[in-house]
Amino acid sequence: MSTIYTLEEVSRHNTRDDLWTAIDGDVYNLTDFIEIHPGSAPPLLETDVAGKDATSIFYGLHRSEVLQKPRYARFKIGTLKGALAKKQAIQLKINTLPSPPVVPYGESMGYWRKKSPYYNQSHHDFRAAVRKFIDLEIRPDAIEDDEEGNYPELELNMKMGQAGFIACLVAQIPESWPIIKSLNIKLPANVELEKYDFFHSMIFSEEIRRLGTYGLGDGLIGGNSIGLPIIIKFGSPELVNRIVPDVLLGKKRCALAISEPYAGSDVAQIKTSGVLSKDGTHYTVTGVKKWITGGMFADYFSTLVRTEKGMTMMVVDRTLGGDHFRTKQIYTSYSKAAGTSYVTYDDVSVPRENVIGLEGNGFYYTMANFNTERWGMVCSGNRLSRLMVEECFRWAMARKVFSKRLIDQPVIRFKLANMAAEVEAGMFNLLLFCSNKILESTLV
């Protein structure tokens, strides 16, 4: 049970060696925090923080989410008298609202604007089911995992497989339907595979990115979303049946290995080579790949290799590579949780049965696969833009400058309106793309 303090009790702790404060009804002992505070002791001692209610000062500088981070939450020692009842009353009021309060334009169209010609009940139910799973299984540790660079655990990956999350990454590929059905995997909200469209796909990408933890999001779905479809679309039945079921169930993970330090995005310039054995049973692959999302924990690597027949796609199995196959973490501008890696193939033996499609057609398979990859990136980018709109709205509501909130400044409202207009325009283009794709599918 939380200890209850009065503000008078808090006020007795107002020195460098004994510093308490109250924020939003909770009491914090900041004595040990002084040493790690960016401004050291002065900002805490020379303002209305030490021994006082610092709620206004805190929210003028920080978002409430800061208090939820483990590194700061550990300084909480109790609650102000009467604050708990007040918080419960506010929560009760929120719970009685017809729908969860949202910041205008901070949520995707079809959620904060319920009436939309683009969505039917299936899409609303799908979003609700995906959001429920994420809030229950991913959100509690998401911020910490993203900041600390923790790789997604296999246990969570298996839960995602059972919940149909990994199947969502390939549900628009008809070739995947027999496997998904044979494994008895149900999509969120039991959406039928045949009715899973680009709107469902967009919603799925939006909900994964809603947490704002982009690195972790890539660690959760990035590798599978680009490494698995190319196997399903172009792989032989034997290859598909050998690899895909375990990936869909979350027991194994995929990555796409295309980019190289020499070529970057210029796929035609890759140098990783594969030499066919004299008996024609396997390829010996040599080369390096760079910026491979999910590579640190992937089991299968859909790899583009230059052979005598031309560029060829093949699956490199980490377990079969042994000491000849190595992955090394690349520290990028976002979270280590994405598992971005540098991959080294040092005479790795790859069975010829692991070739994806026709030898020599790897470049075309890669280009086709990029379509889905780019689509997911665009959807994610638009959703993260909405998150920025939400963050700015909330900050403008809380931050006071010249004795008034930022939101009360006309120039700030104008900037927020421009942000919202740009995000809405981007969303409209996405919706038109979805509509056109669905129309194309009905005409084929």
Image (cartoon, rainbow, N blue to C red):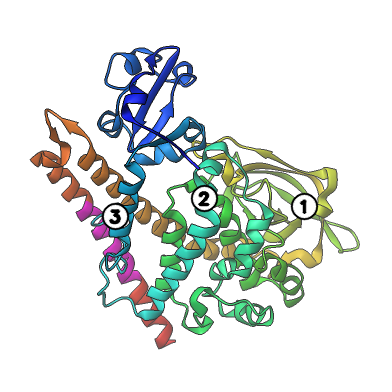
* Residue found at x 36% / y 72%: 434
Q: Quadrant of the C terminus?
A: bottom left
Label 2: few (<14), some or many (≥20) within 10 Å? few
Q: Are marks 1 and 3 in contact (CB under 8 Å)?
A: no
Tell me which numbered mark, 1 or 3, is placed earlier along the sequence.
3
Find residue 140 and name its label.
2
* Residue found at x 71% / y 62%: 251
Give the number of the mark in front: 1 or 2. Answer: 2
Residue bounds of the magenta highlight: 420-433
**Residue 349 percent location from the top left of the image:** 83, 53
Tell me the SS state at disc 2: helix
Residue 316 in sight here: yes
Residue nearer the viewer, 106 or 297: 106
Find residue 318 and name its label.
1
Q: Are marks 1 and 2 in contact (CB under 8 Å)?
A: no
Label 3: few (<14), some or many (≥20) within 10 Å? many
Q: Amino acid at mark 1?
A: Arg
